[in-house]
Amino acid sequence: MKLKIYKAIFIILLLAAIVIIACIALKQWNSMENEKENQEVVEAFSNLQTTETENEEPVKLKGYDVIGIVTIPKINIQYPILAIETSNPEETKEPMQYGIVRYWGGNVNDYGNLSIAGHNNYNGTMFGKTKNLKIGDVVELTDLTKTTMQYEIYDIFVTDPNDVSILATNDETIREVTLITCTNGNRERLILKAKQIV
């Protein structure tokens, strides 16, 4: 009787392990496919003459317009920035699965504060490696005219997810970018603020 119970427990544990391994493998495969698609979009964006040419269609990722490229050389990331029409956290969930999103602000490289948000993926994709950045590190933004500007990180802090003060623009005469990602099990937000290097 005990042998049957042990066999049943073993089979249940084995099946659970197989399901967990399959879920992890599927998540990793989806992440790799998403990374590949992001890099194809970055390349397509880079190959456009300018997106201001009337005959050229805007580059899209999963139906969202690409409004620029964010590059962070120190952590070797480059992603398209997706335009979304809301900063409502519930409505940003879908586009954030695919790339970095404009969470608040105007166009890329406009004056004022552009806030962009990305997932803090465990495998280091999206904004998963931003925790390795330090004050003085450089963030590059390429806009629709193919102009690339460099921004230097001047502040790094953790805040509450409901803290909207991070979106404020203190000086409309400068260009600023705020990188936002989750941290501490999605209970807080890691914020990196950078100003244009003049």
Image (cartoon, helix red, strand yellow):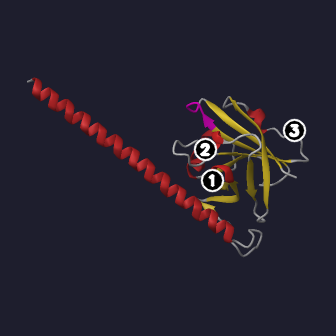
Q: Quadrant of residue 92?
A: top right
Nearer-the-camera pick, 181 or 104? 181
Residue marked by disc 1? 76
Residue that sits furthest to the right in the current view: 173
Q: Position of residue 4 (x, y in %)?
A: 11, 29
State how far apart marks 2 and 3 are (Cα).
27 Å
Residue marked by disc 3? 170
- For the stretch drawn in magenta, the main secondary structure is loop
Q: Earlier in the sequence, mark 2 or mark 3?
A: 2
Q: Earlier in the sequence, mark 1 or mark 3?
A: 1
- What stretch of residues is rendered in magenta? 182-186
Residue marked by disc 2? 129
As drawn, is 143 to the left or to the right of 57? right
Q: Earlier in the sequence, mark 1 or mark 2?
A: 1
Residue at horizontal 58 percent and vertical 65 percent from the top? 40
Which mark is nearer the camera, 2 or 3?
2
Kindly identify the amino acid type of the residue bearing the numbered disc 3: Asn
Q: Position of residue 121 (x, y in %)?
A: 55, 43
Whether residue 71 is visible to the viewer of this picture, yes or no, is yes
Residue at horizontal 35 percent and vertical 43 percent from the top? 21
Kindly identify the amino acid type of the residue bearing the numbered disc 1: Asn
Q: Is residue 11 above or below residue 40?
A: above
Kindly identify the amino acid type of the residue bearing the numbered disc 2: Lys
Nearer-the-camera pick, 50 or 196? 196
Do the numbered discs 1 and 2 sit on residues whose CB atoms are within 8 Å?
yes
Secondary structure under the numbered disc 3 in the rendered image: loop
Circle 2: is it few (<14), some (14-19), or many (20+) Cα within 10 Å? some
Q: Position of residue 33 (x, y in %)?
A: 49, 57
Secondary structure under the numbered disc 1 in the rendered image: loop
